[in-house]
Amino acid sequence: MQGTRFLMQAVACQPHRTATVCNGRRRSWKEVGGRVPRLAGALRALGIADGRFVAALAMNSDRYIELFFAVPWAGGAFAPLNIRWSVEENVYALTDSKASVLFVDDSFLDQSLELKRRLDWVEHLVWIGEAPCPDGLLDYETLIAAHEPLPDAGRNGEDLWVIFYTGGTTAHPKGVMMSHRGLFVATLGYLAWLPDIEDLSFVYVAGYFHFAGASALLYITLAGGTHIPLPKFDPVLVMEAIAEHKATNAVLVPTMINLLIRHPDFEHYDLSSLRTCVYGGSPMPEALITEAMRKLPTWRFFQVFGMTETGGFATILRWRDHLTSGPKAKRLRSAGQPAPGNEVKVLLADGSEAPPDTLGEIVVRSSMLMNGYFNNPEATAAVLKDGWMHTGDAGTMDEDGYLYVADRIKDMIVTGGENVYSIEVERVLFLHPAVREAAVIGIPSAQWGESVHAVVVPKDGMRVSESELDAHCRAHIGGYKVPRSYEFRSDPLPVTPVGKVRKNVLRDPHWVGRERKIS
């Protein structure tokens, strides 16, 4: 269970196939297979061995992909940094990992210089940008050219490969430790449920600092496919990349799919080459997935439910379950069945397994779970119990083993003693023809403790009133679930780097000086 063998496999079986396409550069797997050991030699010369950390603060690129294999090849461990974080947040991550080498590109030069100035253990900055290398930094390509190939260090099994830092909202971020064993098993698990693994080419929009991006990086490499990294999500960039390179696979969160199919130039691009679109990260409204399937009839959609701590996935709603009519159509509202290698249960508050269709906390057990949170045994103990990952998500399981996610427990709204799950209300709001985006949160109420509040972004050129939405919601859900107040915005809702709505940003201003019962 050695992660560098993913690269060895691609080089051995697909030496002449295009491995990476980025900024006008095309490299074969044979070329990448020659560059990575040289980069590892450079890292060893910079002091990387025996699990010492390398960090990166950069947009997606072909060079970033090579780092994922060069770091363990040299004997180190990797700690990608969140591109959305402030200097202070990245100071925390670099202090946690004590990374001594930081790779940086054009977008983060100023921040990297500040980080090096403040942290004396950051010994080297390495330039992986497109512009000429700035003074005082080491140049990526020069390092590769100047060093001889290094034999693989052979890190494997429980050796740490990567730390993915989660985005903290109420406390410091947590570093999710993924071993070679865990990522090896997770990668095989991904390939086991993909409908086909031949001639894959993947368009990346999720940052490689997040497992949504990095997981595909690993399984596409093992399959000897082609990586097409984009610096960020932009509907036009995505459509251009799919059309030009005949990409076959992508991971898109619901927000991205929504923006894609509603873009005014959507009809101008041939997107038919894409065979598999995996979505997840946030709830998918039925109205949206139904429209996406209609507008993209050649795409096979798969929903994944999971988290970084579970190896990226726990359940899968397969393409064959994306039914819009008939007795099994309700499965479209589910997160699917346990994925290969995963056990999934719903537990009651007393720790017993919930009967079918009974609400409880979702827990997951597999061989691809994280090793724990780096330098944080208390947080690890709070979620890893007897081999089970306690996800913090509430849901139900039906008699056929389909999981229905109700909400993040912290996003549940307790109003007048009743539990309201924001996902359920959001799904109804999305059914209204004038609603483009919607997020439901709990805000303080003197009478009810919390009241249901909806933040709505109408579709371009359309207007909708509170009374219209009120009548619409009352036709679909119980009165206590209907929003008691609305907020209309013209700008998109705030999202994380992978497209999840940042409900804490919407909710926290309402709770200044107050304490929620759910946190």
Image: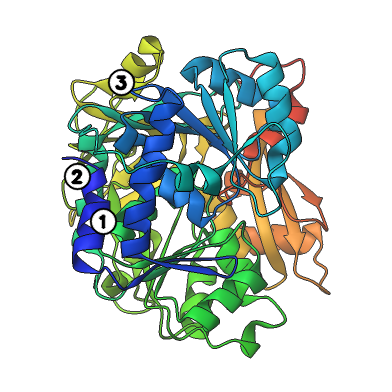
Instruction: From this view, report whether residue 192 is shown above or below residue 432.
Output: above
State which quadrant residue 56 falls in: top right
- Between marks 3 and 2 in the image, the one whose residue lies nearer the viewer: 3
Residue matched to label 2: 185
Residue 190's tag is: 1
Marks 3 and 2 close (CB-CB < 8 Å): no
Marks 1 and 3 close (CB-CB < 8 Å): no
Question: Residue at horizontal 39%, vertical 52%?
Answer: 35
* Residue 347 image offset from top left, x and y in percent: 26, 31
Looking at the rendered structure, the secondary structure element under dot 2 is helix
* Residue 90 image offset from top left, x and y in percent: 62, 26
In this rendering, position of residue 431 left or right of residue 329: right
Residue matched to label 3: 50
Residue 154's tag is: none
Q: Amino acid at mark 3?
A: Asp
For the residues labelled 1 and 2, the Cα–Cα distance comes to 9 Å
Instruction: From this view, report whether residue 266 is shown above or below residue 358.
Output: below
For the residues labelled 1 and 3, the Cα–Cα distance comes to 29 Å
Which mark sits nearer the N-terminus, 1 or 3? Answer: 3
* Residue 470 image offset from top left, x and y in percent: 71, 57
Q: Amino acid at mark 2?
A: Val
Q: Amino acid at mark 1?
A: Tyr
In this rendering, position of residue 104 left or right of residue 323: right
Instruction: From this view, report whether residue 302 is shown above or below residue 440.
Output: below
Which mark sits nearer the N-terminus, 3 or 2? Answer: 3
Question: Residue at horizontal 53%, vertical 83%?
Answer: 243
Q: Is residue 304 visible?
A: no
Q: Residues within 10 Å of mark 2 (few under 14, many from 20)?
A: some
State which quadrant residue 236 falls in: bottom right
Q: Quadrant of the C terminus?
A: top right
Q: Nearer the viewer, residue 217 or 312?
A: 217
